[in-house]
Image (tube, helix red, strand yellow):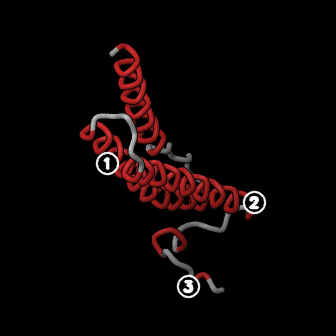
């Protein structure tokens, strides 16, 4: 494929091709973040589908939180892939990945809510 036909042009129209191993590693990282997003969405679907011994509102909020986090992580995975690829092509420092914070907050809040709910259920 000629460079003029490669998409997205916002990435491939800049700089020079990096070592293919680096581009392939960046692609594997993108796919790993995509799997993480899919796992968050699967957790949201499970919370929505299962009848858990949680207050209905809490279960709905946790499901919505995980679904929103999965959606944000999926979009951020693509955005970060493009930023890293372009940085490699231009020889500039690699950017950080803001999706890590989204996953940390979403999973932390969901875990905390489930832990508190379990403790309350055990005490009552």
Residue at point 42%, 48% (across, down): 50
Q: Residue furthest top?
A: 123
Mark 1 and mark 3 lie on one chain; the one further toward the N terminus is 3
Comparing 40 with 12, the one in front is 40
Comparing 40 with 8, the one in front is 40
Q: Quadrant of residue 102?
A: top left
Q: Which residue is mark 3?
A: 4
x, y percentage for residue 104?
A: 45, 35
Q: Which mark is residue 64?
A: 1
Q: Are marks 2 and 3 in contact (CB under 8 Å)?
A: no
Q: CA distance from mark 2 to mark 3?
A: 22 Å
Mark 1 and mark 2 lie on one chain; the one further toward the N terminus is 2
Comparing 38 with 57, the one in front is 57
Mark 2 and mark 3 lie on one chain; the one further toward the N terminus is 3
x, y percentage for residue 109?
A: 37, 31
x, y percentage for residue 15?
A: 57, 66
Q: CA distance from mark 1 to mark 3?
A: 41 Å
Q: Nearer the viewer, mark 2 or mark 3?
A: 2
What quarter of the picture does the N terminus occupy? bottom right
* Badge 2 density bin: few <14, some 14–19, many ≥20, Cα 10 Å: few
* Badge 1 density bin: few <14, some 14–19, many ≥20, Cα 10 Å: some
Q: Which mark is residue 21?
A: 2
Q: Which mark is residue 44?
A: none
Residue at point 56%, 47% (across, down): 94
Comparing 122 with 99, the one in front is 122
Q: Are marks 1 and 2 in contact (CB under 8 Å)?
A: no
x, y percentage for residue 98?
A: 44, 43
Tell me: 65 left or right of 41. Answer: left
Tell me: 93 left or right of 64. Answer: right
């Amino acid at each position: 494929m000629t460079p003029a036909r490669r998409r997205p042009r916002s990435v491939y129209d800049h700089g020079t091709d990096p070592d293919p191993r680096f581009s392939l590693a960046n692609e594997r990282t993108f796919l790993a973040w995509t799997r993480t997003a899919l796992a968050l969405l699967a957790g949201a679907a499970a919370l929505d589908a299962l009848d858990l011994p949680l207050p209905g509102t809490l279960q709905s909020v946790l499901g919505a939180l995980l679904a929103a986090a999965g959606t944000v992580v999926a979009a951020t995975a693509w955005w970060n892939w493009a930023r890293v690829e372009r940085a490699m092509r231009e020889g500039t420092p690699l950017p950080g990945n803001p999706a890590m914070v989204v996953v940390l907050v979403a999973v932390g809040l969901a875990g905390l809510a489930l832990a508190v709910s379990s403790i309350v259920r055990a005490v009552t």
